[in-house]
Image (tube, grey):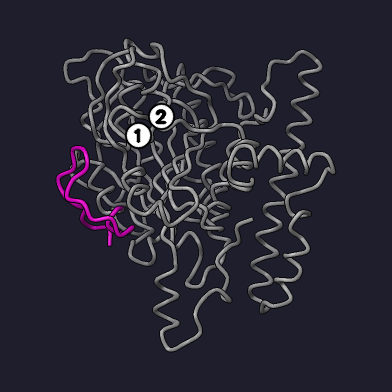
């Protein structure tokens, strides 16, 4: 079982400070929401620091100093450019690539390599998993999902090559087994069967070694280890509880798949917890997280919106629909806040995990009614190891390529490339 970075792992000599800095990992996460965002409730009225938080962002007002809102960034290659309808598919495929996808519902799909996979190819070899792709809504890899565009486009934001999307995992149990199993598939199944047989946690299996290790650690490291183990145990308990609910529903002939939480918010939080644990144990430094596929028509009865999300995004300036869209957007931000607070709660050698992470949250569509891809809603959280200035509203000229931000992020990951998709250079006013 992987361990978080402990003080005891750092060299104790004259070069300790520089060595500690060298082993401090930088992470990047991309969190995608569908159907655009209510821009009038998202965009701050003033620039710079000291801006008033719009209502959609109210759930993360306590984190205001840990993120910035970036206005004016665009993915112009997600526009039709002569290809007609299909904005949901194009917005998803283009969001991390900056490449206009080929309009096809067949096997000849074509987009571009995404920023996360550029980073994974460069630094993924430093961790057990080059990258982690997770989400909360299943997606198909074939068929027509949006006006002649393959389902592969609207279901994936990560692309390993121009013809190979990286499928996300939506089942929390399978993500957990991948991260904390025994490596190969056969070993993972054997490990899980052994734990299930004795109804043990993975921690029960390693506890003897863990106790021996703790006796050799200082109090700070002991606290780190306890915090990490408690997080793993908590996730295990939640997965087991959800699976029991799934089995009960199956017995009642319900159709909910086993392992997928019935509570959407819990699903997001559980996947977010595993992303954080993967970062904490340095299992990976790169993650993409889709809250849902673009075009999703999920309903939100828990916040008083029984109608579908996609339907409400086509508001036609109807005040009732606009308010329901605002509530959905605010609900998503509430879940984002949970993940950001978890990142911030984990102390590292220099600051917190959030300080050493770059998180991009946003959508590939601006206004869901207009289906436009300029002036996208983009939130950047984390300080990128102290280099990023947070707590601001930064306004760029509209149609500034979003990929310029990605070039800057790759630079912070130590990945030096000259261009990505439609980029025109690194983004100014960030550092």
Q: Position of residue 119 (x, y in %)?
A: 34, 49
> Which residue is depicted at the point 55% across and 17% down?
307
Residue at image x 74%, y 76%?
Answer: 215
Counting from the top left corner in percent of width and height, residue 422 is at: 18, 38
From this view, report whether residue 265 is shown above or below residue 322: below
For the point 72% across and 40% down, which residue is it? 192
Residue at x 31%, y 45% (from the top left corner):
118
In the image, is 253 to the left or to the right of 95?
right
| Picture quadrant of residue 96 | top left
Residue 349, percent from left and from top: 51, 72
| Secondary structure of residue under mark 2 | loop
Residue at far front of view: 186
The residues colored magenta run 410-431
Give the residue furthest to the bottom. Answer: 14
Q: State how far apart marks 1 and 2 are (Cα).
A: 8 Å
Image: 168 above or below 139: below
């Amino acid at each position: 079982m992987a361990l978080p970075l402990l003080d005891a792992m750092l060299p104790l000599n004259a070069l300790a400070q520089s060595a500690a800095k060298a082993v401090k990992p930088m992470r990047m996460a991309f969190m995608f929401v569908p159907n655009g965002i209510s821009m009038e409730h998202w965009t701050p009225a003033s620039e710079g620091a000291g801006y008033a938080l719009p209502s959609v962002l109210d759930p993360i007002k306590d984190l205001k100093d840990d993120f910035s809102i970036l206005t004016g960034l665009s993915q112009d290659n997600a526009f039709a450019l002569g290809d007609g309808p299909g904005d949901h598919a194009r917005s998803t495929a283009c969001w991390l690539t900056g490449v206009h996808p080929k309009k096809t519902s067949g096997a000849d799909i074509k987009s571009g390599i995404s920023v996360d996979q550029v980073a994974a190819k460069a630094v993924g070899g430093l961790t057990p998993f080059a990258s982690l792709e997770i989400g909360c809504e299943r997606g198909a890899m074939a068929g027509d999902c949006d006006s002649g565009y393959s389902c592969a486009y609207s279901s994936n934001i990560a692309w390993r090559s121009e013809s190979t999307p990286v499928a996300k995992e939506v089942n929390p149990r399978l993500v957990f087994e991948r991260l904390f199993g025994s490596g190969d598939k056969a070993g993972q199944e054997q490990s899980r069967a052994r734990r299930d047989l004795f109804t043990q946690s993975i921690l029960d299996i390693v506890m003897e070694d863990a106790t021996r290790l703790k006796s050799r650690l200082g109090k700070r490291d002991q606290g780190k280890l306890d915090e990490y183990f408690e997080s793993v145990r908590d996730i295990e308990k939640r997965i087991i509880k959800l699976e029991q609910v799934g089995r009960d529903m199956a017995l009642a002939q319900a159709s909910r798949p086993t392992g997928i939480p019935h509570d959407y918010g819990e699903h997001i939080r559980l996947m977010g917890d595993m992303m954080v644990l993967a970062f904490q144990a340095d299992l990976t430094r790169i993650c993409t997280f889709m809250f849902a596929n673009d075009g999703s028509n999920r309903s939100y009865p828990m916040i008083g919106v029984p109608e579908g999300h996609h339907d409400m995004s086509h508001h036609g300036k109807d005040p009732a629909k606009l308010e329901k869209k605002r509530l959905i957007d605010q609900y998503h931000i509430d879940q984002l806040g949970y993940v950001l607070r978890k990142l911030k709660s984990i102390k590292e050698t220099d600051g917190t995990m959030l300080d050493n992470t770059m998180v991009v949250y946003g959508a590939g569509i601006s206004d869901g009614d207009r289906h436009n891809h300029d002036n996208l809603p983009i939130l950047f959280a984390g300080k990128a190891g102290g280099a990023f200035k947070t707590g601001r509203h930064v306004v760029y000229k509209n149609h500034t390529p979003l990929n310029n931000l990605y070039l800057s992020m790759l630079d912070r990951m130590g990945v030096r490339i000259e261009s990505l998709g439609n980029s025109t250079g690194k983004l100014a006013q960030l550092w």
